[in-house]
Image (tube, rainbow, N blue to C red):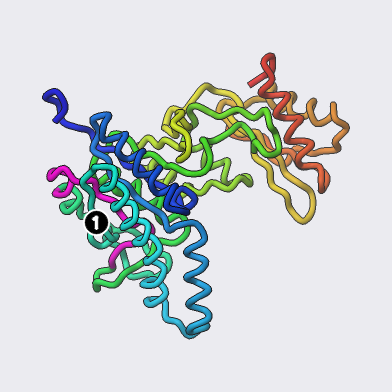
Amino acid sequence: MLYGRPMKTIIIKFGGSSLADPGKIRRAAGMVMAARRRGLKPVAVVSAPADSTDDLLKLADLTAGPSASAREQDALMAAGEQLSAALLAMAIAAEGGRSVSLTGAQAGILTDDNFAAASVRRVDARRLKKELAAGRIPVVAGFQGVSPRGDITTLGRGGSDLTAVVIARALGSASCEFRTDVKGIYTAHPAIVPEARKIKTITYDEVIRLAELGTEVRQLRAVKYAKKHGLTLHLRSSFHDEPGTLVTRAGGRRGVACLSMRKEAGPALVSAIGRGLNRRHLAAAEKAAEACGLAHTVESFSSGHITLRTAPGKAETLLKALHAAFFAKSSLT
């Protein structure tokens, strides 16, 4: 209790790049403890340390080749997240906190028996609630659960992100944070468009379209689950305390929210993604393409996106032109 009020639970999920070495693990522990000092009840969910999953796959291949069973592959793959969970729990203890590491099974992540791509059937949150009630900080190994037969299963690509949101729903958490090596979602890829802006708030549907139209969104399965159950997500950096991007049902203002790019073997596709897009937005996109001398066609157009097709090798030029058209101070958004 804090001043007579129940403490709110927060889920903080750390990606593998955030746990790549002891210094980064200690930084993550500090962030968990900072949440505790703010009067919250944190639950950490962790990915395997950066590159460790690939290392385990290589080890399996060198040891057994293609003869390794799916069951044993999952038992091996789950080890990376368990390593992160134990180390982060130790680091939290070194910071003065009381913590306990939990496997997916111990945290009550109950799945089907589809090895390597299991679906979560339900979460038995009794152990998590017991640890929280005792004042301990659970650190849950993501990406894994347990089948009806008691076997370790893994959840496939984005599995640790999925672990975080199913736990958030099971505990009725006030917030679910994703801490990674990026500060949030930007209006365009900052490596291509240095003036790209971090987006404060975006809708679930806009993030899903962003992924469908070419941008890698590592938390996509989690975003779809959050949309279904109305969970607000906060995508932010593991290395900075500044706010990131909130993913919600309402999102920010109408208009163009961000840009996506897809380079294909043939022509390239560049998309403007948002809400309430109309003929004025389409005209602005085409005018921007014409102004920099790019031949193009309208691949598709709806109230949620505008996609232009242009010549191979010209995607970045078109992306920059559209960003200037939609995100300059006097632009149409």
Q: Residue furthest right?
A: 293
Image spot of residue 295 (x, y percent): 86, 38
Image spot of residue 165 (x, y percent): 35, 46
Q: Is residue 241 visible?
A: yes
In this view, the residue in front, 98 or 78, is 98
Question: What residue do we see at 57% from left, 25% from top?
Answer: 276
Work out which quarter of the rendered image holds the N terminus and state it. Answer: top left
Question: What residue do we see at 78% from left, 27% from top?
Answer: 288
Image spot of residue 129 (x, y percent): 17, 47
In this view, the residue in front, 92 or 140, is 92
Q: Amino acid at mark 1?
A: Ala
210 above or below 119? Answer: above
Quarter of the image holding residue 314? top right
Q: Which residue is mark 1?
A: 107
Work out which quarter of the rendered image holds the C terminus and state it. Answer: top right
Q: Is 136 within the magenta?
A: yes
In this view, the residue in front, 98 or 298, is 98
Position of 43 with respect to 178 (left or right) is left
Position of 33 with respect to 245 (left or right) is left
Quarter of the image holding residue 5? top left
Quarter of the image holding residue 158? bottom left
Question: What residue do we see at 53% from left, 40% from top?
Answer: 182
Image spot of residue 202 (x, y percent): 49, 31
Question: What residue do we see at 45% from left, 57% from top?
Answer: 49
Helix, strand or loop under label 1:
loop
Q: Is 210 within the magenta?
A: no
Q: Which residues are magenta?
A: 130-146
Q: Is residue 302 visible?
A: no
Q: Residue furthest top?
A: 330
Mark 1 is surrounded, within 10 Å at the Cα level, by few (under 14), some (14 to 19) or many (20 or more) other residues, namely many
204 above or below 114? Answer: above
